[in-house]
Amino acid sequence: MLNIFEVTETNKMIEQENLDVRTITLGISLLDCIDSNVDTLCDNIYNKITTVAKDLVKTGNDIADEFGVPIVNKRISVTPIGLIGASACKKTDDFVKIAKTLDKAAKQVGVNFIGGYSALVAKGMTSAEELLIRSIPDALASTERIMSSVNLGSTKTGINMDAVRLMGDVIKETAMKTKDADSLGCTKLVVLCNAPDDNPFMAGAFHGVTEADAIINVGVSGPGVVKHALQSVHGESFEVLCETIKKTAFKVTRVGQIVAKEASKRLGIPFGIVDLSLAPTPAIGDSVADILCEMGLEYAGAPGTTAALALLNDQVKKGGVMASSYVGGLSGAFIPVSEDQGMIDAAVAGALTIEKLEAMTCVCSVGLDMIAIPGDTPNTTIAGIIADELAIGMINQKTTAVRIIPVIGKGVGENVEFGGLLGHAPIMPVNKFDCADFVNRGGRIPAPIHSFKN
């Protein structure tokens, strides 16, 4: 039972410290929609989504009103479309037709985004998966709410370098096709290593094939709450620092657990996981970088940043695991540049570079996220950045990702405005030296020796 102090404390977290349930994500299996005719497949997909998700937004709004907990987004994830469209899709236009169907269904039920326009090609690509990947630029340019992800590697299989090289071209083409909106399409496209099946956060969310027919996953976030808690132990030892983060993460996760259970009960859909991820927003006071500064750094990116982020990520996970039996997804600290005002300030000050961000991704929950780079960056350089980040995930048995935006027509020193939760970002410089001969080799980087655990 909660006592009055805990109720008051939670209210303060919500009202003053930016605590929110970032998303209720309804995962929906589309395996029973498969058909060899693309029009029939699209009809099946639309009917399934609009039936299963018809009450999702209303339920989320009702819970938010009754519990007084902000629920920022209501989202859907579906089975990777690279699998669902394999029988019916013979050309890229067929996959784009599915993307438009997903977008139409998302608008009909009122969700913010729908994820799962995805391919899982860690070891190799089927012809259908390659078609889906090549269709991504057109799909993202002709839809509003589609999120796309491609898993290019894993600790068990290694890294599919053919797909990595292809994604360098696809990201650049997506940027070109959405250049009138500052290459906005690339904000909806992420590539991953070791992608989890139950991640509720976009753009990497998809409904894994091992999941039930439908599932409720909740993502909860509270960087402002953690920062505020650390202000009360300013200058204390690392032991006190760790205990404070852990206890705060426990309280935040409990809020997510309550919302997830309630949504599951009202919708009649099984509860999956709570993802406790310190996912920042552009709002002042809702920044992971500010937490690092509260620990004693002048800016995120200063010496000691990787150690501070490692401590933060570990204590968040420890606190979260104690609060719920079903913690999943990514669960930890996110470091998206454009979505975190503290990260933006650090980049503008010169404290934060892509190379330092890459080092930080070794110990955080995802990877190089929402980074704007010059629009004339070579495709092979983008592929090289992807390969570096995926190698970190493969070797360290963790999820890593790259969501990078080559902003066509803009260069270093300029700024790009994406709007809303996507925020704004300075164009960051990229290493000018060439890696084309490396990424053009083709084939697969093999799995590391410690992957053999059978």
Image (spheres, rainbow, N blue to C red):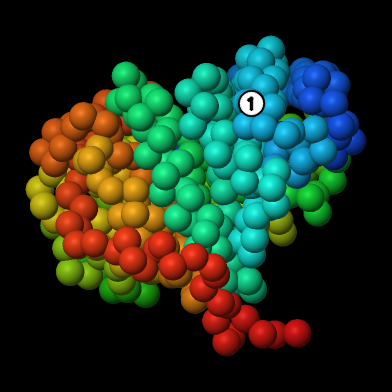
In the foreground, 181 or 424: 181
At which x and y percent is residue 228? 33, 47
Q: Judge from the rendering whether residue 369 lies leftward or rightward of residue 45; answer left or right.
A: left
Q: How many marks?
A: 1
**Residue at position x 57%, y 48% from top?**
150
At which x and y percent is residue 311? 38, 69
Question: Can the viewer see residue 251?
Answer: no
At which x and y percent is residue 395? 49, 76
- Report the amino acid beneath label 1: Asp
Q: Which residue is mark 1?
A: 93
441 w.r.t. 90: above or below: below
Question: Can the viewer see residue 252?
Answer: yes
Image-quadrant location for residue 333: bottom left
In the foreground, 137 or 90: 90
At which x and y percent is residue 383? 39, 55
Q: Judge from the rendering whether residue 135 lies leftward or rightward of residue 387; answer left or right.
A: right
**Residue at position x 16%, y 37% from top?**
411
Q: Judge from the rendering whether residue 302 lies leftward or rightward of residue 137; answer left or right.
A: left
Identify the element where label 1 is drawn. helix
**Residue at position x 63%, y 40% from top?**
131
Q: Residues within 10 Å of mark 1 (few under 14, many from 20)?
A: some
Quadrant where the C terminus lies?
A: bottom right
Image-quadrant location for residue 207: top right
